[in-house]
Each structure stands twice: as structure tokens, then as C-alpha cells.
Image (cartoon, rainbow, N blue to C red):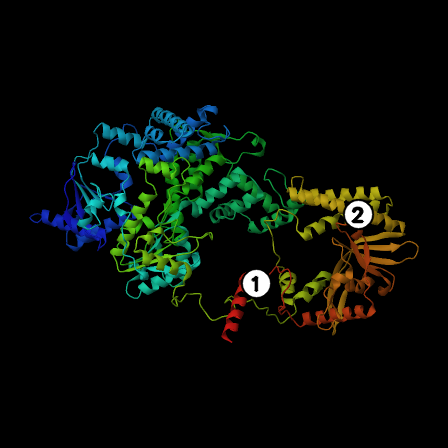
Amino acid sequence: MSDDLLPTRGCRREFVGWDRPLLPQVAEMMVAGMMIDSATKNAVSDFSDWICVLPTAQSALRFGNLLCSAAESQGLQYSAPRILTSGDLAEALYEPENPIAIEFEQTLAWARVLRQRDATSLRPLLPVLPETEAIGPWLELAGTLRRLTADLAAHDVSFTDVVTASDGADEKQRWKLLQELHEIYLGQLATAGISDPHQQRRRAIKRNTIRSDRRIVLIGASDLNPSVANVIKAVDGDLVAYIAAPADNASWFDDLGCLKTDAFSKLQLPLTDQHLVPAGDIADQATAVSEAVTEFAASHRTGQIAVGVTDESHVAATEMQLDGCGLSSYRHLGWTVASTAVGRLISLTATLVARPTWRSLAALVRHGDVHRVLTSRLAASQDYLIPLDQMLANHLPVNLADPLPAAAMKHYPVADQLRTAVLEWLSELIPSPASAASVRTRPIADWCLCLLEWLDSIYAGFSSDDAISHDRRLTAEAVAKARELLTRFTKLSGHLDVPVSAASALEMIAARLADLRVGQARGDDDVQIHGWLDLALDDSPAMVVVGFNHPYVPAAVTSDPFLPGSLRSRLGIADNERRYARDAYATQLLLSTRQDVRLIVGKRSADGSPTPPSRLLAASPAEDVARRIRTLLGGTRHKDNVSHRWDNDRATTELPIPKIQTTECPVKTMSVTAFKAYLECPYRFYLRHVLHLKPVDDLARELAANQFGDLVHAAVEHFGESDEKDEADEKRIFESLRHHLHDYAANHYGDHSESAVRLQVRQAEQRLRFVAAEQAKRIDQGWRIHATEASVEESKGAGITVDGKKMGLRGRFDRIDRHEQTGQWAILDYKTHGHKPEKKHLRKNRDTGEFEWIDLQLPLYRMMVPFLGIEAPPQEVQLGYFNVSDKADETKINLAEFGEPLMQQAMDLIHQCVRRIFACDFSPNEQGVMYDDYEMILQTGVASRMLATASAGEGEGDQ
């Protein structure tokens, strides 16, 4: 430690070295100094007239805790200083002439300036401008200009400076326009009675109104922007800067302790090969973190180990790995409010208000808090989600304003009640269908007041004290943050506020919630997860940094659309060299202030893109750099055997497949189609036909294959029941078929269905043209439709007796024809494909070459002939398909030609199936099925197949 010379305004620099963490040293020094000053007085450590300035919120919080602990360890009565971040300091040192505009008000002022300008005059700024009425794009552009202005002002650069430094007439014209617009922007703020913070800082300095009656202590504030630095320099008072560096390096820092860029360009970092850990993708990097933390945990408490992430995409994977190792963690970054239940609620509501569709409604009503509110409103005995999903899957409605199809209203009244409840609940936000043509607009402040009341209606009485689980504590914090934001926005300047729709207001709020963060309670043994900027002043004795790569460390700043890297350099604005110096200094501190450090260098980012090693690795001797780069890019690390909660020797998952345990046969009657399901897999048969478990696809936007088949079936079925069934004219047959098709479509899908559904109806119509031609031929051949959708049931005596037990049978027959002259009967089943019955019923065994049955539909039809009132021997009744294909030549009647030996095999197989069912044989099929609706239950999905493959691979390696 040493004193340096005093600058002009009296800033004393204290260099404390970089062999120990800065914050504990400064806390001890301040308490020791206070003890000397108060040696003859009471044992008091009173810092209430001090302002301590730190670079980040986390370092400020940590320093406050360290200072309090240092005072209490000496038995002193402690009075805390005012602790601020460097970004908050400037406005604490002067009184603005007008209240400072919040960022959103600044954005609104810029948007007002831009929208009031003639489009032609803005061409130098942007060749393509947003539409005049669309506020969202204007706010986006305004936000860009606000950030640009703040960037310039933070570095004490004026628009005049940029005009001078610009190259080319076009660039100079653009910046002159921006200068003009900026003056108008300041005028808009003044008219609104508020002010720009950067303008107020400059005025305060110029008028010499910067004041502080407190001692100001700068602690590790090595990267102050020029705007803040100028405010500090204007303070005429006691000013101290504590700097983490040896006194010999005093020339590397300016009068306020800020680093000089050139001084760090040739810094040699104290890197060793042991510090660097190669890793692959994001998952492997997280694994490397858990290995390093486990290693350090042998000599440090886990609460003393810090993990630094250079990009937020590393956080979730790192947390999961640490949790798997049984290590709890604490993320100082917290979570964005947008990622909490409150943020998702507002985002989902914004989507529904902007696009009032059934799909967006279904997403919103699944939100847990919305589900709670709506359940109490509906007071229904059944959860509304099940009928809602079924209605969406079966009828595919689109817009909430459109009436539901008649069939949907009949079978799913709860869905309609839900729609009514949601629209009533959000009536302030969603206009009624009658007024939908004219979108209701209000000032943003009014919408925020409305949203406050709406939010309170959902979370009334909800506080963090009542929240037990981690997620609910975050929700409680998020509610408070959202309320704070909305409350502030209710006070927006009336001059700057603009009328917007509810959808636009919600989208604005949702976007700004992404900038707010909430945190969790930290445990003493939690591994701390920090962002990169917090690492330099962190005092943990062990540290792991993940993502020591380009473009994270140092981050590039050359992608600004208005301020490219070359222009930034000419203006002296923070550029790549400045970022390099800042991060080189930070790396120096984290390496020199502790012994246990690991820098994990990955090969790929979370999105799979390559991430080269950080260029900070070049701050070493050339021979070391070359060797390390080769190791990091081509080598592999020694992987320690870290145990996870999920590690085991099992070849399968621990989730058991539910067993079917029944002593009494639960099946009393079977449908014709159920036999095929049993042949495929007895277990899946049980799930579908006994437990009635069926998948529901509520995300479909077009008819599934079975729904398309139902559409065609309905048209031909109703035709067969109509007066036109004996019509011989092809055109009239088609007109009748088309009428029944559209009647069914309107009843089930309405007049406002998805475009894909309307297209499928057209495709079905084309198929029915082919059907009409085939039906006309059938009539000409002397055949007539005798019955459509005829049925047999157990109550009519239909059944199969096996070993003295009777299994009831039920079935519906698409079509029964009879020839007028010969009296021949035919049972036909409509199929929306072009395959013959033999292809769908039989499969050749690869081993024996013999045919085996895979579907028993038509043989079962023969067995039920006596129950249909057909007075003919069953073997004389024709069986077949009426194929309704998308090709004309495949749309025809294909009769089955099985032969009696095969039919006898089918009879035997039918009896065998019934016998096995009576014996409660519902074992799973080991071979699986082609299209599996139950892969999650039977664990035949991707994850299980990958596990099986991995296990097989390990087995082969062992041999």
C-alpha cells in the first residue's frame, strides 16, 4: 500500500496491490482508519457521511457485508455508508433543473421527434422508414437513437465531434441530421417538464453545481466512463480511490484510478497450463465446471467457490450439472421478470390480445395462475383443459370471434363457456367482435393503470412471505417488480405519451420486463455463479470461469450500425482496445488474488457455433501461447470421475412400465377394429380399448389421416342414406356427394376453418369425383346400395364362443350392396387409399415365406353375416374395399381373394386372440409398432433408443 500524488481536485489514490482481493482489504483499512480516528472516543464505526462507489451492484452488496463484518469483528458500533454503483453516482451529486426522464420517456421523446418529421428529411438516417401508424417500429428506432445518444454522452462526445470525425459527405449529412434531431428531442423533454440525464450532468459541471458534503471513496472503479469521471472531478471535497494494483504500476492508472488502455496492451498475464481446461460443447463445458468445483471442494467450502460465466447461456447448463453433483448454487445474475410466471402471463396475454385465436387462448389458460382464476369463475365440475384440447384436436377452430361449428358446440360446451369467461375477464383489453373493426386506443399510462388492476386481481394478497417454494418466491418478487414498473408508467409525461392499442401496450410492457431481474435467497453453502464483470472484485478463494473464449472475453464492440469500430477509435469511445485492457486487468486480478483458478475454454457455443480461445491467451510468452492453443483446440482434458444423481449401471430408465394386473377379464365385447390392435400389441390394445387412453393433438392445423378419412366417409355414408343413392347419372351423383361433404365439413369445422382444412375439403371433393364415376358404373352393373352403416351388437346375438365363453362382437359396416338380378351380396369398406385388401390384411413371414394375418377385419365381417339379416351362406358374400384414392385409376372396388385355407387360418387366429384375452394376456409386443401413440408409457421414444444404443456400444467395447 502506498500514497500517490494528489491530483488537482484532491483525489488521493491508494494502491493496495493485487496479491489479495481488493474488497476485504479496503473494508479492513476503512475500519482500521476509523478506529484510529475514534481512539479517544466511543467505540463507533460511523461511515454515514461517506459515499462508497463500486463498479457493479454485486460488488456493492458484497462490500457492504464485508465492511459491516469488519466493524463488528472489532466490536464497533456500525453505521453504514451510502453505497452506490458508479452508474448511480453522478445523479447523487447534483440537483437536476427538471426531473430526470426515465429511459422509456426518453424513447417516447425520440419517437415523437421522428414521427413528426417529414419522411424525405429522414432518408439520410434510414432508407426505409416504418409506417406512420405503427408505433412499435418507431419505438424500436427511437430506442436505437436513445442508446446511441447515451453512448456518445457517456464518453463526453458531442454530435459536433462526430460530424468532424466522420468520413464522407453522406456520413457527415447523417450526423448533422442526428444533431438537429437531438436538439428537437431535448426540446420535447423540456416541454414535458423533464430532462435528459446527460444534458443535466454537463450543465451541472458547467454551472459548478456539483456538490457533496460526504467523503467519496472509489473502490475498484477502474472503468469509469468519461461522463461520470467528469462529474467526480468537479467535486470539491474529500475523494479517495482504492486501486487493486502495486504502487509500481501507478502510471497504468489515471487520477481517478481508471486504467489507461495503452498500459495494458502488453501486459503479460500470470497464466499457467494448469489454469486452462479444454472442453467441447456447452454441455461438456458445464461438466468441466462440475469437475473443477468438485476438485476445489476438497479444500474449500462450496460457499467459497465462485463460478464465473462469460455468457448467460452457460448458466442453466452449469446449474444442472452442479445440481446433479448434489451442489446447490446461487446465480447472482438472477432471472429476468420475463422468464417468471408473471412475465409469461403478460407475454401470453399480449399474444392473445394481439391475435385472439383459439391457439393463443389455449396457451394462456394453461398458465397456472390463469387456470386458478378461470376455474373459480367457471365453477365447473370438470377441468376445462381436457374438453378444450379435444375440441381443438377434433374441430380445429381458428379465431375466437368466429362461431364454433355446431358439432363442437354440441360435444364441448365447456370450451364455449371458457371462451366467454376469458373474453369477459379480458374485456378491457380485447375488444368485442362488434367493435373489432375499430381498435380501441388509450395512452400508455391509462393502459398501465388498467394492467395494474388486472394484475392485482390475479395476485391479490400474494407476497413473498406467503411463498414457500422457490418458484413462488420468484413470482412474488416478479409481481412486485412488475407493479413497480406499471406504477411508474402510470406517471408518464402526458406530452410524450401516445395512444396505443392494448396489444401494443402489453408488448411494450413485456419487452421491458426482460430488463428487470429477480433473485433468490442465497444459502451459505451455495456455489456462487457470477457474471464476468463481477469476477475482478470477487474475493472467493477458488474460482472457475467457463467460456474463456472469443467473442465473450473480451467482447467485441464493432457491430454498432451508427458507430463502427474505426469511428469509435477516432472519437476515443470504448472500443475493442479498451475492452481488451479492461478484461486483461480483470483476468490479472482473478489470477493473482487466489491460487485455485480454472479457465474453461470451450469449442462451441450454446447454438453450436465455433468459439475460438480468448485472445487474452496471447498475453503470454510466444512459446507458451502456441503450445496452449494446440492443446485447447486439439487435445482432450483428463476427465475426473464426478458422480451425479442420475449415474447408475442400469441399461434402462428407472421409470417402470406400468404392469397390467387383473385376474378377471375386463373385456366383455370387442369391435372389429380392436382385433388388429391386439395383434399389433396386446398391451397397447389394453391402453386404448380398455383404459380408453388416446392421444390428443391440440396443435394440429390440418386434418389428420383419420379425420380426413372421416370426412370422406361421412360424404359417402350420407349419400348412401339419401334418395340419390340409386342415381345413375355421374354428375348428379357427384353433386349429391359434394353436398354431403360440405355439409359435414360445415358441421364439424365451420365456415372459418384453417386454410389447410379448406384445402383438404377441396382434395376430398376431387376424390369424390372419382367415386361418382365408379358409383355410376356400379349402378350400371346392376348393383344397388342395400344398407349404409349397418351395425351388429352383442345385444343382437353377435359374438364368438371360445372354450364355452362368449366374447361379444360389435361392428359397423360402411356399405352393403345387393345385385338386382343375381341376388349377390357384397360387404364393402370405404378406404382412403388405393391398396387391395390382401396388402392390408396379410404379410409374408420372412422366415417361412408363408402369409400371416395382420388385420382380421374382413374375416370378422364374414363371421357377422348371419347377424346382418343377409340370407346367404357367409362364404358366398363378397368382401372388399371401396377404395377412395387420390388417383382415378385406384378409385374402385377391390374384392378380397383370400381363399378358404387362409380364411380358416383367420378364424383360428380370431379364436386364439379371444382365448388370450380371456386369459388376461396383455403383454407388450417386444418388436414395437410402426406408429406408436404410447411411446412415453412404453419408453420406446428417442431417449430410450439412445440409451439402448449406448448400452449396446458399451457392451461391445467390453468384449
Q: Quadrant of residue 624?
A: bottom left
Q: Is mark 2 on a helix, strand or loop?
A: helix
525 vs 688, left or right, is left
Q: In which quarter of the image is residue 730?
A: top right
Q: Distance between the residues labelled 1 and 2?
A: 42 Å
Q: Does the residue at mark 1 contact the one at mark 2 (Cβ under 8 Å)?
A: no
Q: Residue lying farthest bottom?
A: 959
Q: Is residue 369 above or below residue 179?
A: below
Q: Residue lying farthest front?
A: 623
78 vs 291, left or right, is left
Residue 699 is situated, as x and y percent measured from the top left of the image, at 59, 49
10 Å neighbourhood of mark 2: few (<14), some, or many (≥20)?
many
Residue 815 is situated, as x and y percent measured from the top left of the image, at 80, 54
| Residue depicted at x 71% and y 61% | 673
Looking at the image, is mark 1 or mark 2 nearer the viewer? 2
- Of the residues shown, which amino acid type is indicated by label 1? Ile
Q: Is residue 613 above or below residue 920?
A: above
Identify residue for label 1: 937
946 vs 670, left or right, is left
Near-viewer residue (73 or 595): 595
10 Å neighbourhood of mark 1: few (<14), some, or many (≥20)?
some
Q: Is residue 647 above or below residue 693?
A: below
Residue 195, can we see it?
Answer: no
Q: Is mark 1 on a helix, strand or loop?
A: helix
